[in-house]
Image: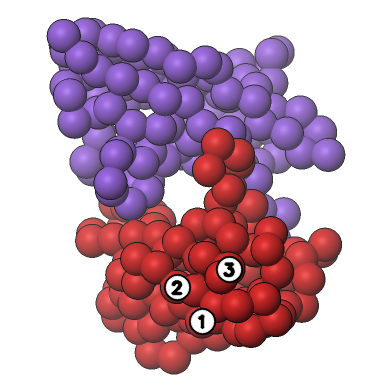
Chain colours: A red, B purple
């Protein structure tokens, strides 16, 4: 199973929005609504921000939203804030021998 | 609150084994599975396997099946991941993660453990 494809980087000014794509296949992203997104500040534990494509854990601001179309999932961060500057990666259930597959990661920069 | 605290960095020689621990707190230990994943330099995260602590069953990625063992100590609320026959390509940050309350995807992560394989 290959990693899910994300753009290496994305950026936006404070208050703007940025959208990150996560492209898989019909065996993972396209097959299941079990896509999750994580925010990772280097040196810290990754934090779940979206699960089941579009659901937010309690405590995660509604500035973070997720969606999916076909084999591609997307994360949108609206109203960018300085603390949103981090690495973001997606994850999808894939079944089979490798239950989960992760994205290649996107570094978000707040200009 | 849920916390996963991993053991410290390790340096190993090629051919050796490494055992990384993940101590859990803040929830009932046996209810949730624990995933292990790793991220090598410049690479994406790679799922390695998981353990169901309730029934003590494991599932491993085919990429590691012959070299990995994930075990749990319920008396210590700790999960261990042992990787054997280490090679330089195993240099990576290794993470444990607990399943989410609503499903089996990673919900809470440890801080990561750097394992360096070098002669």
Q: Which residue is mark 2?
A: A10
Marks 3 and 1: which is nearer the front?
A: 3
Calculate the distance from the C-alpha at mark 2 to the C-alpha at mark 3: 9 Å
Q: Which chain letter goes with mark 3?
A: A
**Quarter of image, res B34:** top right
Rate crowding at label 2 as few (under 14), some (14 to 19) or many (20 or more) other CA atoms within 10 Å.
some
* Residue A54 against residue A2 in the figure, above or below: below
Instruction: Kindly check if marks 1 and 2 are in contact, taking CB atoms under 8 A apart as contact.
Output: yes
Marks 1 and 2: which is nearer the front?
A: 2
- On residue A110, which mark appears? 3
Q: Nearer the viewer, residue B22 or B40?
A: B40
* Residue A30 against residue B114 in the figure, above or below: below
Query: Do tags 3 and 1 sit on the same chain?
Result: yes
Picture coordinates of residue B107, whole percent (x, y): 63, 51
Q: Nearer the viewer, residue A87 or A70?
A: A87
Picture coordinates of residue A76, whole percent (x, y): 58, 80
Picture coordinates of residue A109, whole percent (x, y): 52, 65
For image coordinates 25% across by 34% down, the residue present is B64
The reply to whether residue A38 is visible in this rendering is no
Mark 2 vs 3, N-terminal side? 2
Mark 1 vs 2, N-terminal side? 2
Secondary-structure class at tag 3: strand
**Quarter of image, res B105:** bottom right
Rate crowding at label 1 as few (under 14), some (14 to 19) or many (20 or more) other CA atoms within 10 Å.
some
Q: Which residue is mark 1?
A: A19
């Amino acid at each position: 199973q290959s990693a899910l494809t994300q753009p290496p980087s994305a950026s936006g000014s404070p208050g703007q929005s940025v959208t990150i794509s996560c492209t898989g296949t019909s065996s993972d992203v396209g097959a299941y609504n079990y896509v999750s997104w994580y925010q990772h500040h280097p040196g810290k534990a990754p934090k779940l921000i979206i699960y089941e494509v579009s659901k937010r854990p309690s405590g995660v601001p509604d500035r973070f939203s997720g969606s999916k179309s076909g084999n591609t999932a997307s994360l949108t961060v609206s109203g960018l804030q300085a603390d949103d500057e981090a690495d973001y990666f997606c994850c999808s259930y894939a079944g089979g021998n490798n239950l989960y597959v992760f994205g290649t990661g996107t570094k978000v920069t707040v200009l | 609150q849920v916390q996963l605290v991993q053991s410290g960095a390790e340096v190993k020689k090629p051919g050796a084994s490494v055992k990384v621990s993940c101590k859990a707190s803040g929830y009932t230990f046996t209810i949730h599975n624990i995933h292990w994943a790793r991220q090598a330099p410049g690479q994406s995260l790679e799922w390695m396997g998981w353990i169901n602590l309730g029934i003590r069953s494991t599932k491993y990625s085919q990429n590691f099946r012959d070299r990995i063992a994930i075990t749990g100590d319920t008396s210590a609320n700790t999960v261990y991941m042992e990787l054997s026959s280490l090679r330089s390509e195993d240099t990576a940050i290794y993470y444990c993660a607990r399943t989410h309350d609503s499903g089996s995807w990673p919900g809470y992560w440890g801080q990561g453990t750097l394992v360096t394989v070098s002669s």
